[in-house]
Structures are given as C-alpha cells and as structure tokens.
Amino acid sequence: MSEAKPSEAAPAHDTTGPTKILLGLVIGAVLGLGLNLMFAGPGEPSPAYQNVLWVADRIANPIGQVFLRILFMVVVPLVFCSITLGVASLGNLDKLGRIGFRTISWFILTTGLAVALGLLMVNLIQPGKGIDPAQATKIRAQFQKAASEKMAQAEQGTGFSVDTFVNIIPRNVVRAAADDRETLGVIFFAILFGIAATMLPTERIKTFIDVLQTVYDLCVVILGFAMKLAPLGVAGLIFAVTAKLGFDVLVALLWYVLTALAGLVVHQFLVLGLLCWFLVRYSPLQFFVRARTAMITAFSTSSSNATLPTSIRTAVDMGVPPHIAGFVLPLGATMNMNGTALFEGVSVLFLAQVAGVELSLGSQVVVVVLAILTAIGAAGVPGGSLPLLALVLVQVGVPPDMLGLILGVDRIIDMTRTVPNVTSDLLCSLYVARREGVPLPDGTPTGTA
Ligand code: ASP
C-alpha cells in the first residue's frame, strides 16, 4: 500500500521562518497594546481611538482573516486525504486498532491531567473570592447578549449525550464537511474509506491513492502560500485583538485571567515537557523549539483546525511517519483539547465562586468528567468550547448567564489554550511513532527552521 507522504515534489511552506512570524506577533501586539493604552484611556476613549478601531477593523483584521481563511480552506481536503491515506497505508485493522488505542489513551490521560491541574490552581488561588460583586454585575450586563447567544447554541445540541456518539456518523458527508462542528463526521467517513481501501486489491485502488496523494500535496502547496502571508496575517490578527481588548475588564478579572494563564503555561511546559521526557523519550527543549511554528500559529489563530496543516508538516519534519501524523493529528485537532479542558475547569469553579455556589468535592469530580467530555466535543475553532462551557455550568448549578462575566477576556485565554491543545496533539504523534518503534532523529530541525 502506498504511504501518505507530503511528497518531495511539494515545496515546503517553510520558506518563511518562524522568526519572521514571531516578529509579526510581537510587532502586532506591541502596536495594538500601545495604541490601546494611549487612546482607549482609563476613562472616555479619545477621538483618535476611532481611527485605531478603523485600522483594526478595516485593515488589520481583514489581512488576518485572509491568512486564517486560506488555512481553513485546506482543512477538509487535508483531513480527508491524510486520514484515508493514513488508514489505507496501515494495511490492516490490527495496526489501526493499536495506533487508535494509543492515541485515545494519550488524549484521555493528558486531558485529565489538564483539568486536574486547572482545578488545583483555582482551589489554591481562589480567584473568585476577591471580585467586587457590583463590578461583576456590570460586566455581566455588558456581555449579556453574547452570553445568551452561546447558551442558545448550547441548547441547539452541541451538548454531550448518547446522540453525540450517534452523530459522529454523518447522515450526509457533504454537509458534515461544510460544518465546523462536524469534523468528526468527516474523520469517521475517511476512516471507513481507508478501511475499505485495505479490502480491495492493490491494483484496483492504486489510482485512487495516487489522486488522494496529489490532492494532499496540493494542499501543502497552498499551505505554503498561507505561510508566506503568515507574518503579516499574524500581526493583523493580534493587532485587532489587542487594540480592542478592554483593559478595565482585564483588570477586574485579573486573578481569573492569571489563574487560567498560569495553569495553561504550567501544563504546556511542565506537564507536557515531563511527558515528552518520560513517555516520548525526546528532549523537551528540542521539541518546543521544533514545535514553535505550530505553537505560534495556534496562538495567533485560536484554532486547532486552522493550525492542523502546520502541525502535520511539523510532525513529519520531526520524523513522525506521514501515516501516523495524518491519522493522529486530525483526530487530535478535533478531540484532544488539553488547554480547553483546563480552561473549563478553571472557569466553572471561578464562576461558582463569584456566584456563591459551593462546589463539593463530588461536584468537582463531575466538573472533571464533563470538562474532559466537552473538550472532546468542542470544535477546533475560535471560541469553539464556549457553548459547551455553558452546558457544564448548568449541570453543576451555576447560572449559565455568568458566562457573560468572562467573555470579554476570553480571546486572550482562547489564544493561549489553543497552544497546549495543539502541542499535545503533536506530542501524541511523536509518542505513537515512538511506540511503533520509529526512530526519531534528535538533530537540528530539517524543515521548519
Ligand atoms: N479555540 C480552541 C481550539 O481551537 C477551542 C476552544 O477552546 O474554544 O482548540
């Protein structure tokens, strides 16, 4: 069976190095924050702030959106081709079962660790106890509309139930491909396609495999176009966020934001670093250096899906065989969300503290389980987990409109939580490769630098 390879013929997207992208990130953030500080003022914004907003809305954000849309554009063909090719090249169901089992075990282990860490941090720091109730009510009123939209989405069945499992099987695969929340349906279809391909004689499916391989390679070339735009796109996205970010809201919720960010940073570098060392037997320093383009893309796009093309490329550059990267990473982008689970744990407990709802140890265990399940169900798009967070709040007796309190600062946490979401997927692909006996070269990065 032919192997899924982002072939040699496809030029890599790495002509633009991570340094330039990082530079874009820093310049965009400094400009945005600087202009916000200068003109948005602690009191009334100065008239010039309108111009800043105009630049953010009309110039910076559109540039960022072009970058983001090109990334999103290749996700469906890439997921379909990489999974079908990956499964087909495994050649048999035993191997699929083994890789699948290791992948899912990794997802559950790391997501569980992440929520537990989140809960530990909130119980230690108690960020909800210090918030001024009058100010909390004010902020909630400000975001009431957005909160009710998220609650309505939650009621529309993005929730987690028996149906969630049934719904993994798409009734109409084209519709599943058209809906961000149904990526699992596309994955399911692609896995079945791959399995079916292993059951036909090789000569019957050879052309089909070649076509998929070519489509895959073309996606990689298109990804190269997006990455050329990355420094500018990343600068635009971050500028638009930072120029608008309300500092008042940030200060009021400072302890909550700090608790969430601290938890995410500890998980990203300490927990995942330790797992990298002990389970993957790979130098954490090497790993983080090599994963930096994927990490920056995750941070600036707030989307696991949008980062998928970059993370597949990064994993392959690190020595993960394409059929493993092509199977593990799309599944991870949809199902494995460490940062999201940690964020949910922190947010539920924080909002319970503000609302004065005591959560017993038992309820906290419920939060852990629900956070793991909803992190699996969340879509890998910006804010994809918010409707599900509303559901968890309801389950443990916290009024869901409390969500309004944290929406104003969610973007910065969303950006940060997407980084461990993606990093854990990458590490999982290395772990599976290692367990399959693949030698992982530890030398200097070959492609991404
Ligand atoms: N933005 C996250 C991701 O794409 C999902 C979320 O937590 O809202 O991974």
Image (cartoon, grey):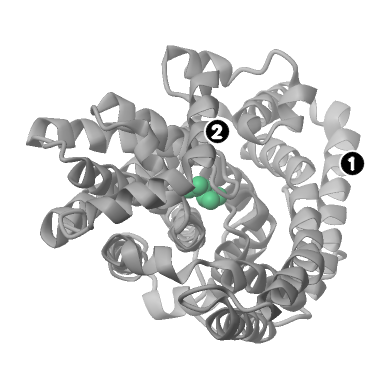
Query: Which residue is nearer to you in this view: 34 or 442?
Result: 34
Position of 332 with respect to 367 (left or right) is: right
Q: Quadrant of the N terminus?
A: top right
Query: At 74% from the left edge and 50% from the top edge, which residue is drawn?
Result: 72
Helix, strand or loop under label 2: helix
Report, in whole angstroms, how far the alpha carbon at label 1 lies from the one at label 2.
42 Å
Q: Quadrant of the C terminus?
A: bottom right
In the rendered view, tell whether residue 144 sits above or below residue 44.
above
In the rendered view, tell whether residue 67 sits above or below residue 164.
below
Query: At 15% from the left edge and 55% from the top edge, which residue is drawn?
Result: 129
Report which residue position mark 1 lands on.
211
The label number, if any, that marks residue 149 in the structure image: 2
Q: Is mark 1 within 8 Å of ligand 1?
A: no
Residue 20, position as x, y percentages in the image? 69, 85
Residue 102, position as x, y percentages in the image? 40, 42
Mark 1 belongs to which amino acid?
Val
Helix, strand or loop under label 1: helix
Query: Which residue is nearer to you in this view: 446 or 398?
Result: 398
Graded by Cα atoms within 10 Å as few (under 14), some (14 to 19) or many (20 or more), the crowding at tag 2 reads few
Query: At 89% from the left edge and 41% from the top edge, which residue is drawn?
Result: 211
Whether residues under marks 1 and 2 lie with C-beta atoms below 8 angstroms apart, the answer is no
Could one spot residue 446 in this view of the protein?
no
Image quadrant of residue 226? bottom right
Mark 2 belongs to which amino acid?
Glu
Residue 21, position as x, y percentages in the image? 67, 79
Query: Which residue is nearer to you in this view: 437 or 192?
Result: 192
Could one spot residue 158 in this view of the protein?
yes
Query: At 17% from the left edge and 60% from the top edge, which residue is drawn?
Result: 130
Residue 198, position as x, y percentages in the image? 70, 27
Q: Nearer the viewer, mark 1 or mark 2?
A: 2
